[in-house]
Image (cartoon, rainbow, N blue to C red):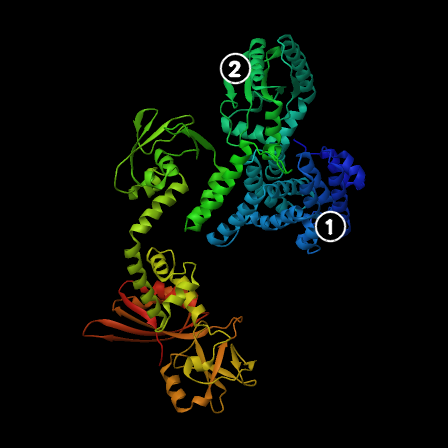
């Protein structure tokens, strides 16, 4: 297993280090001013954490030192190390960014604030809630990444130390954290090219997710360790002599083998352990690219090359800019051997990824590979602003992080990076939305191919377009295989949404009016409803309803929110009465303004339920009667005895149910009442009364059903389901007796 500063980590856990000794053991020689800053950060962290311990049992201070040491091993700057030492102080409420800013400056404080934003990275993994919530969490995370990539380094280092201490947690928690690490953190480290972290995160996750398989592979490796080490020593000796004879300066070392990668290769290729070529492996480090290929020639002249076991990642780097030559040969004693050949610079990049190229001093130069990765992060951020559907954003982010990639070439010679499985249509939409919309055919390497063709690495793609026209609806059918990427599907879907806008607005208005009718609402402010939704404008709101992006239950919730009286509203605004400003709690489910401890009862004429706009009427001897604000009886009472009208509001939080009457009109048939009752039963709604009559002249049944509901949302769901019962013509709430 790869071990980032494992020896230092052990000393930290044993509490055997002071600040100066810790600094002396770090692999980076920081200048005197940086060392002074790190000593200050050490003192702040030590005093702030004290003896506090984490859920795993290790001390917060030891955890902070371990994270800082991992980052130092990645050759990161002093500001990053200082932020790492203090990162948990903010979470624990023991420190604030402003104090940090005064002590360490803006650089360290900004990193700590970025880490606070980065907390939402965990929300991506099986977070309960809406797609909108997931999308917002992702946007915050990526914003933090794009502002300063060092925030991601600290987050990954923190997760690595968490995994190292995982043995102290309960098994269920071990599996949860390991799954999260395998699904999210290890792929993120891989995409950024930080293999030194990626491999250890993967191996540790593998250990807890599949302990038996892990132990089996570890045992197989251990059984052959002495033999393998002797064999590698022999290989290094022979190869060193051959390279020296060829005039190639090189460093040769045995390559550590990672258990998870062994298992993945066995699964991917259907191989048994003894069939793997790279159990025995060496790595050759040379000065330049030319020497890489020269060393490859020496290796192949020394031992026989195994066909189809050669990869040139120098000419064609991996998606995370990994570069190296990989070859498998029949080595000494007829045993298979893997040889990796790369420059020292490539090795640094392979181990540290983006971190290897980060320069924090003023005037420092960022290498192109680094800038490409930052551009990728910023591009992902822009996607969230480009698309209306949050589900698309979430899906696209997952695809870009986790899917394998395919590299194809445009007619201009540009290399286009797409998810594996992408089609010419996906390519067209990647180039430009208009090219995607007007695409009518494609050529791959000069020959016509179907639009469902799966692109392969290195192919040149040309799109054939028409002057006019748009996408086909068949393209959105997943089973037909035209569009494989969520980015392209979102663009095609957006085109159809725009074309159908007017139709969706009209349909949405009809649906909304029907829903309001069912709820018995006659005076809803549609503009206000739209503003309370995530769409803001009325036309956008209606269009969303028309394309079924907003459900009947969501409409009911918005209506309830609008009807609940705000604290600053007066009863005069509701029914031209003057409220008393004081407020008290009534006995029941209603809060009463301006009265003492009075009893309340729900009026039987209109039967209000939570979510309805309500008004109170002070009766003679029976407390306060609660009516819906649109109750005809209440309006009559207000005209006759307006001084008895008072402002009230729902005192929510109890588990009481409320009586409501619903009216149903349907074509009479046998079993009609039974089917309606079944709907109410499935919704767990109690029926307390049923009145039915049938008009013989037209065979129409008129039902009034008295039910008990929790709130308007439950009522809406029930009426929506009754509306689709066979022969039902109309269903709505009765507004008065």
**Rounded to the nearest whole Å, what is the CA distance between mark 2 and mark 1?**
53 Å
Label 2 belongs to which residue?
Answer: 306
416 horizontally vs 32: left or right? left
Which quadrant of the figure has residue 190?
Answer: top right
Label 1 belongs to which residue?
Answer: 53
SS at mark 2? strand
Residue 490 picture location, percent across and down: 38, 45
Which callout, 2 or 1, points at the residue further toward the start of the chain?
A: 1
In the picture shown, does residue 115 fall above or below 697? above
210, 579: nearer the viewer: 579
In contact (CB < 8 Å): disc 2 and disc 1: no
37, 234: nearer the viewer: 37
Q: Quadrant of the N terminus?
A: top right
386, 92: nearer the viewer: 386
Residue 76 picture location, percent across and down: 66, 37
Q: Is residue 602 visible?
A: no
Q: Quadrant of the C terminus?
A: bottom left
Residue 549 - label: none
Which quadrant of the figure has residue 526?
Answer: bottom left
Residue 129 picture location, percent across and down: 50, 54
149 horizontally vs 699: left or right? right
The residue lying furthest to the top in this view is: 245
735, 24: nearer the viewer: 24
């Amino acid at each position: 297993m790869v071990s980032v500063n494992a020896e230092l980590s052990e000393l930290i856990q044993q509490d055997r280090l002071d600040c100066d000794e810790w600094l002396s053991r770090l692999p980076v020689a920081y200048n005197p001013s940086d060392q002074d800053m790190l000593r200050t950060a050490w003192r702040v962290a030590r005093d702030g954490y004290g003896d506090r311990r984490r859920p795993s049992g290790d001390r917060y201070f030891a955890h902070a030192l371990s994270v800082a040491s991992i980052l130092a091993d990645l050759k990161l700057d002093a500001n990053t190390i200082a932020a790492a030492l203090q990162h948990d102080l903010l979470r624990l409420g023991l420190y604030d960014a402003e104090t940090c800013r005064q002590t360490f400056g803006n650089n360290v404080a900004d990193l700590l604030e970025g880490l606070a934003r980065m907390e939402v990275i965990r929300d991506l993994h099986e977070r309960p809630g809406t797609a909108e919530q997931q999308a917002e969490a992702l946007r915050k995370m990526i914003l933090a990444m794009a502002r300063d990539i060092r925030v991601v380094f600290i987050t990954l280092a923190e997760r690595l130390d968490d995994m190292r201490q995982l043995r102290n947690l309960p098994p269920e928690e071990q599996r949860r954290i390991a799954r999260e690490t395998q699904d999210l953190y290890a792929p993120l480290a891989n995409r950024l090219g930080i293999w030194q972290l990626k491999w250890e995160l993967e191996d540790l996750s593998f250990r807890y997710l599949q302990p038996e398989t892990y132990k089996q592979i570890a045992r197989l490796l251990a059984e052959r360790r002495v033999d393998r080490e002797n064999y590698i020593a022999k290989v290094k000796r022979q190869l060193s002599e051959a390279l020296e004879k060829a005039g190639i300066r090189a460093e040769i070392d045995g390559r550590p083998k990672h258990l998870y990668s062994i298992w993945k290769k066995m699964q991917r290729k259907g191989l048994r352990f003894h069939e793997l070529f790279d159990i025995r492996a060496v790595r050759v480090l040379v000065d330049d690219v030319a020497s890489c290929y020269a060393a490859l020639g020496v290796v192949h002249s020394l031992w026989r090359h195994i066909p189809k076991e050669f990869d040139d990642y120098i000419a064609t780097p991996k998606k995370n800019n990994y570069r190296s030559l990989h070859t498998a040969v029949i080595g000494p004693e007829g045993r298979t051997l893997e040889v990796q050949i790369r420059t020292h610079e490539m090795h640094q990049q392979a181990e540290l990824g983006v971190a290897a190229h980060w320069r924090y001093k003023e005037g420092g130069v960022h290498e192109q590979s680094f800038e490409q990765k930052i551009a990728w992060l910023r591009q992902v951020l822009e996607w969230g602003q480009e698309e209306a559907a949050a589900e698309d954003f979430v899906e696209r982010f997952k695809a870009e992080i986790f899917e394998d990639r395919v590299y194809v070439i445009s007619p201009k010679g540009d290399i286009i990076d797409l998810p594996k499985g992408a089609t010419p249509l996906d390519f067209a939409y990647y180039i430009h939305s208009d090219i995607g919309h007007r695409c009518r055919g494609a050529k791959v390497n000069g020959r016509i191919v179907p639009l469902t063709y799966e692109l392969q690495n290195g192919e040149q793609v040309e799109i054939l377009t028409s002057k006019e026209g748009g996408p086909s609806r068949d393209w959105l059918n997943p089973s037909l295989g035209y569009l494989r990427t969520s980015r392209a599907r979102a663009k095609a879907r957006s085109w159809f949404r725009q074309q159908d806008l007017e139709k969706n607005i009209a349909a949405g208005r009809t649906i909304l009016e029907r829903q309001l009718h069912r709820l018995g609402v006659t005076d809803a402010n549609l503009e206000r409803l739209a503003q309370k939704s995530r769409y803001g404008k009325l036309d956008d709101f209606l269009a969303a309803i028309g394309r079924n992006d907003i459900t009947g239950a969501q409409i009911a919730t918005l209506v309830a929110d609008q009807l609940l009286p705000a604290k600053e509203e007066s009863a005069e605004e509701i029914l031209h009465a003057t409220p008393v400003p004081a407020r008290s709690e009534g006995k029941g489910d209603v809060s009463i303004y301006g009265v003492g401890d009075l009893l309340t009862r729900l009026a039987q004429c209109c039967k209000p339920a939570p979510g309805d706009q309500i008004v109170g009427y002070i009766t003679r001897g029976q407390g306060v009667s609660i009516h819906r604000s649109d109750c005809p009886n209440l309006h009559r009472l207000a005209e006759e005895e307006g001084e008895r009208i008072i402002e009230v509001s729902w005192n929510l939080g109890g588990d009481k149910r409320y009586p409501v009457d619903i009216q149903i009109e349907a074509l009479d048939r046998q079993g009609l009442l039974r089917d309606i009752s079944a709907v109410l039963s499935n919704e767990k709604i109690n029926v307390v009364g049923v009145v039915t009559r049938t008009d013989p002249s037209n065979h129409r049944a008129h039902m009034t059903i008295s039910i008990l509901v929790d709130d308007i949302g439950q009522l809406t769901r029930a009426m929506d389901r009754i509306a689709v019962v066979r022969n039902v013509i109309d269903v709505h709430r009765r507004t008065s007796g």
